[in-house]
Amino acid sequence: MGDTWIALHQGRGKTKTAAKDKLKEVLRDYEDGLAIAPTGYTVKDAVTDWLNYGLAGRDPGTVTTNTILCNTHVIPALGARKLRDLSADDVDRWLAAKAKVLSTRSLEAIRSCLNRAVKRAMARDKVKRNVVELCSVPTGQPGRPSKSLTLAQAEAVLVAAEDSPLYAYIVVSLLTGGRTEEIRPLRWDHVDLDGAPDANPVIPPHIAVWRSVRSTGDTKTKKSRRTLALPGRAIDALRIQWERQGWQRLAAGDNWKENGLVFTSAVGTELDAANVRRELRRVLARVDGITPDEWTSRETRTSFVSLLSDNGMPIEEISRLVGHSSTAVTEVVYRKQIRPVIQSGATAMNGIFGPGPKR
């Protein structure tokens, strides 16, 4: 009886028709087993709730990206719609309209935002079902294709970077294929420039790619956690970095923030993606035939894959080196660069680039 009274009470309206419509909505919720809640709960309310509470513990960059996607693409188009009235047709039409201006990857991202927001609302009895899960992502506009440096361009980049504060970063990224979020938080205690030549088996100089800038500190996947032998040119670059960082530490004095990081700002703090991208483009501007603004930091990684593939390394070995969960990932992401055959990381890079200039 109490629930019925609540339903009747919430069914009030300014006119009989309005009251009747409200009562129908409340009774429908009641029959569906939903909590008796305000019937004006909108898509915007659900999305805002998810952004505020559903992303707790996520990396700040992830939160920012999802907030921008929601505020730019989800809320303006669907935000005013009552969540309970949102239909699969609404979502299909929305995605179809966005497919005219967004890439398929971006469409997947905005659908994911809406899907997760509605799923959270459903778990809180705001809506009976999640219609977003009934909708597929259409094919969007072609995204910006990844690019790779040719061998001649890569060699020119390494030379152009020699006086850059990020010389060692660029060398290590290009010659090991590490993700930018893995190389930026690399620590000296995860770098071994000597190895153990007398051990059995021999342990070569190497870096341990065990961390990333993600909120948990973990690498992207379990297979991303790997230890990579260093080619000679990367060993030399890291020795130079050790010396340069010593001078930076002295110059900064009390302002130096000791974090044990290999690649830092002038006062020891961790580099962010914008720092790296800006400096990489400054270096690329010195190389003939390259338009620096068209390149991103991740393309040192695609270049690594391309160079190894062209040198004859099998896809299975390339997949292990770059930390992909399977060769299928490597083929999909880098399919334009892949060719099969033989060899292995540091050895291959020594063969491609040689030991590097003597200093």
Image (cartoon, helix red, strand yellow):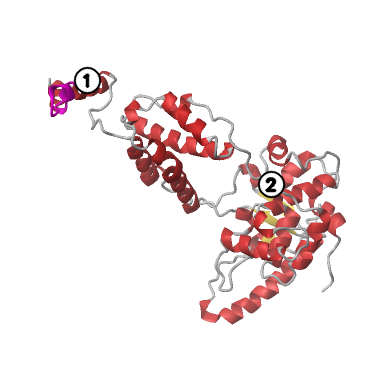
**Camera-side residue of 9 and 227:** 9
Is the residue marked by circle 1 packed among few (<14), some (14-19), or many (20+) residues within 10 Å?
A: some
Q: Quadrant of the N terminus?
A: top left
Residue at 56%, 30% (x, y): give it.
138
Q: Position of residue 300 (x, y in %)?
A: 71, 54
Q: Which residue is mark 1?
A: 24
Assess whether residue 109 is covered by the magenta stretch. no
Q: Which residue is mark 2?
A: 146
Q: In what element is the residue under mark 2?
A: loop
- The reply to whether residue 295 is visible in this rendering is no
Q: Where, by quadrant of the figure, is residue 168 drawn? A: bottom right
Q: In what element is the residue under mark 1?
A: helix
Is there CB contact under 8 Å for labels 2 and 1? no
**Mark count:** 2
Residue at 58%, 39% (x, y): give it.
103
**Stretch in magenta:** 10-20
- Three-letter amino acid code at disc 2? Ser
Left or right of 43 in this view: 322: right
> Which numbered dot is residue 86?
none
Q: Earlier in the sequence, mark 2 or mark 1?
A: 1
Left or right of 106 in this view: 349: right
Q: Position of residue 281 (x, y in %)?
A: 67, 62
- Three-letter amino acid code at disc 1? Lys
Left or right of 193 in this view: 137: left
Q: Position of residue 57 (x, y in %)?
A: 44, 48
Q: Where, by quadrant of the figure, is residue 53 drawn? A: top left
Q: Position of residue 319 (x, y in %)?
A: 73, 42
- The reply to whether residue 52 is visible in this rendering is yes
Q: Quadrant of the C terminus?
A: bottom right
- Relative to 348, say whether 101 is above or below: above
Left or right of 262 in this view: 83: left
